[in-house]
Image (cartoon, rainbow, N blue to C red):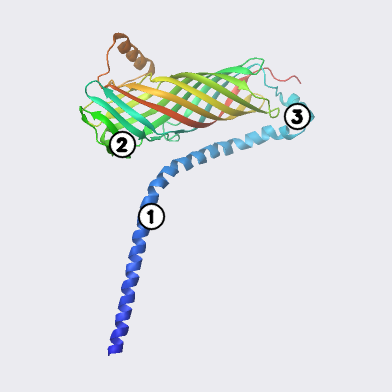
Amino acid sequence: MGACARVTGDRSMRAATGRAWLHRTWVHRTSVGARAKSSATRRREGLSTLFAIASLAVAATPTVIGQTAEGSRSDEAAGRASARTGLAAPGRESMVAVYGGAPYTYPSDVGLWKDGVHDLTARDVAWDGKPFVNPIYYGARIVRFGAGRLGAMLDFTHSKAIARLDEDVAFQGTLNGAPAPERARLRDIFRKLEASHGHNMLTLNGLLRLPSLSLRLQPYVGLGAGVSLPHSEVHLAGPDARTYEYQFAGPVAQALVGLELRTARVSYFLEYKFTFAPYEMPLTGREGSWLPLDLWSQFRNWWSGTEPPGGRLTTTFVSHQGIFGLGIRSAPLAAP
């Protein structure tokens, strides 16, 4: 009897120990999974960006391969091919192009100021670009080259910057005349904080063609400056009216380097751009409509010295951008 009781007790202890081990393992895996979920969410957009860029490249591959098969031959054979295909060496020409891509914008401080009411700084606010969610990332440009290596480009880029409202950030200063919390969710201060229609940049750029890699492959660099024309969407958590309009928010500068793949009339290009855009958004509490009308309203307020009723919001968008596009060139064809 005593031996049977001991055996039964040992089995019960082993079963209880097994159940406890399974419980600890499940809790540990659940905890690890919860911690990993946040980082996985942050990685998802980066992976989707790379996948979309790769998809664009794959979609263009059949055309590119067909048009560049001759480019792998010797220089003499490439010269004969250019006569057959009408591909002239880079020279005096114009091009109209469109492109898509993906940005990464660094975290930045956000300032909120209204005399006697707000003097607030939110530290290291993180921004999402969401380039493949409507409205998508896109751009258009007009390029003109002379007979030499120098050219000019008018470039419009529609990007986005959307604050991650559910993240905790550090605050300094005052809000509504009282000390701001040292740390809080951004959503506790802002219902909306973004330029999603979008972080628009219009720049005039100088271009320089570098020595050609082949008859079809032409690298280039550029440097430019212009204006930021965002659709500002700012709404404080409270009774204040939201600002929802196009605005002139300040200057923007950009630098770029790219590689152009040339066919007889069409060019494909891959490009990296770096942009720097300090913002100052007047919080007008206005529901805007159309870009020219919104800018006219902003100009009238500036001319009359009218201060925005909600104060002003400042930040700086520093971004890396990878783009892929195609353009149609107008230039004389190579002589047969």
In this view, the residue farthest toward the bottom is 1
Q: Earlier in the sequence, mark 1 or mark 2?
A: 1
Rendered image: mark on residue 180: none
User: Which residue bears the numbered disc 3?
Assistant: 78
| Residue 241 visible here | no
Residue 90 location (% of width, % of height): 67, 21
Q: Which residue is drawn at 62% across and 17% down?
A: 150
Q: Which of marks 3 and 2 is nearer the N terminus?
A: 3
Rendered image: mark on residue 170: 2
Q: Are marks 1 and 3 in contact (CB under 8 Å)?
A: no
Q: Residue at x 41, y 26 (%)?
A: 199
Q: Which residue is drawn at 33% across and 64% down?
A: 23
Residue 30 location (% of width, % of height): 35, 57
Residue 52 location (% of width, % of height): 51, 38
Q: How crowded is mark 3: few (under 14 residues within 10 Å), some or many (20 or more)?
A: some
User: Which residue bears the numbered disc 1?
Assistant: 32
Per the image, label 1 sits on a secondary structure element best described as: helix
175 relative to 39 in the view: left or right? left
The alpha-carbon separation of the residues under discs 1 and 2 comes to: 26 Å
Q: Nearer the viewer, residue 171 or 12?
A: 171
